[in-house]
Amino acid sequence: MSLQELEDWLRERGEPKFRAGQIFRWLHKKNVASFLEMTDQSAALRGVLVENFYINSIKIKKKLVSKVDGTVKYLYELSDGSCIESVFMSYRHGDSLCISTQVGCRMGCKFCASTLGGLVRGLTPAEMLDQIYTARKDSGRKVAGVVLMGIGEPLDNLDNVLRFLEILSCPDGRHMSLRHVSLSTCGVVDKIDALARLRLPLTLSVSLHAADDERRSALMPVNRKWPIAELMRACRNYFDATGRRVSYEYALVDGENDADADALRLARLIRGQNCHVNLIPVNAVDETPYRRSGAERILRFRQVLEEQGVIATVRRELGADIAAACGQLRLAQASSATGGAQCPP
């Protein structure tokens, strides 16, 4: 519930408005697991809350810690037995948590582990928040930034994502500035337009991965509905509406999209935009034939872009020894499970 909804619910029952703020802070700052822990509320009110609501929780099913860089990967089990992932990453500017927004994904990007098995369901705002609260409680570390780049397509679950962002940024709760939140999309153009109209100060990261329609459609089925020209129009509009620089994610796949000609095509496509290209060495997934480009080819690709005046960086790999790329741990869990409905693929 949003703070306003909680205020309205309590007011209808004759409770003062300030009670809502107290309860909201217990939930989103102190992250209590029970209404009975809310010691500044009367026993009667706590009883009413117990009768009408529940506090969502998720369980850490598996935790992997990188021996290389300290990256932590969580496999969470939800109340219905479904599994999702989060990854806790350390940077010089603070610790960021990459969270999931769906159980599975229906976008069908050919080299992504998250989409194998399709979409099960969208996550609720509480399940998104709980990834942050559980990681923070387990690690004792502050979550300085949030990246919506785990399992699922955030814009395919936009209503719940917007509610999550509202609660995350509420001054009576976690009060995280949305400037510290990045949202990654494979290119759901109508929802990018909807997001632009809201003028939220999010960083939009667009998974591009190819600069021509034929190749992008082969790698990313979403391009068949919204070709590159429509996507570029939406990205320019997003910058005009928000003033926030767009980041283009480009996963380099050996022999597929990593030639000098591909880099030149990409440079021509985005020239003139206020943007940044994040080059990603693609993570190998056993169930797909795609493999990462070699280190020299990746550096050469960046060089060609920079020679064309494009700002480009190569993403620093974190947690490579613990399969930290989204979907890999969940996929392995599903493959090893025997019987039952736990952690559906």
Image: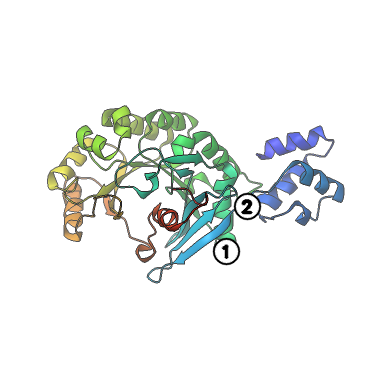
Horizontal arrangement in the rendering, residue 174 relative to residue 113 (left or right): right
Horizontal arrangement in the rendering, residue 246 relative to residue 270 (left or right): right
The structure residue drawn at horizontal position 33% and vertical position 60%, both measured from the top left corner, is: 317
Horizontal arrangement in the rendering, residue 90 relative to residue 263 (left or right): right
The structure residue drawn at horizontal position 29% and vertical position 32%, both measured from the top left corner, is: 223
State the residue in front, 89 or 329. Answer: 329
Q: Which numbered circle lies on residue 57? A: 2
Q: Which amino acid does label 1 sit on?
A: Asp
Secondary structure found at label 1: helix
- Foreground mark, 2 or 1? 2
Q: Which numbered circle lies on residue 138? A: 1
State the residue in front, 274 or 63. Answer: 63
State the residue in front, 192 or 294. Answer: 294
State which quarter of the image contains the N terminus.
top right
Residue 232 picture location, percent across and down: 30, 32
Residue 136 seen anywhere in this rendered image of the structure: yes
Q: Which numbered circle lies on residue 97? A: none
Residue 294 picture location, percent across and down: 19, 58
For the image, the number of numbered tags is 2
State the residue in front, 95 or 225. Answer: 225
- Badge 2: residue crowd in 10 Å (few <14, some 14–19, many ≥20): some
Secondary structure found at label 2: loop
Residue 128 picture location, percent across and down: 54, 47
The structure residue drawn at horizontal position 37% and vertical position 55%, both measured from the top left corner, is: 325
* Distance Cα–Cα, label 2 vs label 1: 13 Å
Q: What residue type is labelled 2?
A: Ser
The structure residue drawn at horizontal position 20% and vertical position 49%, both measured from the top left corner, is: 306
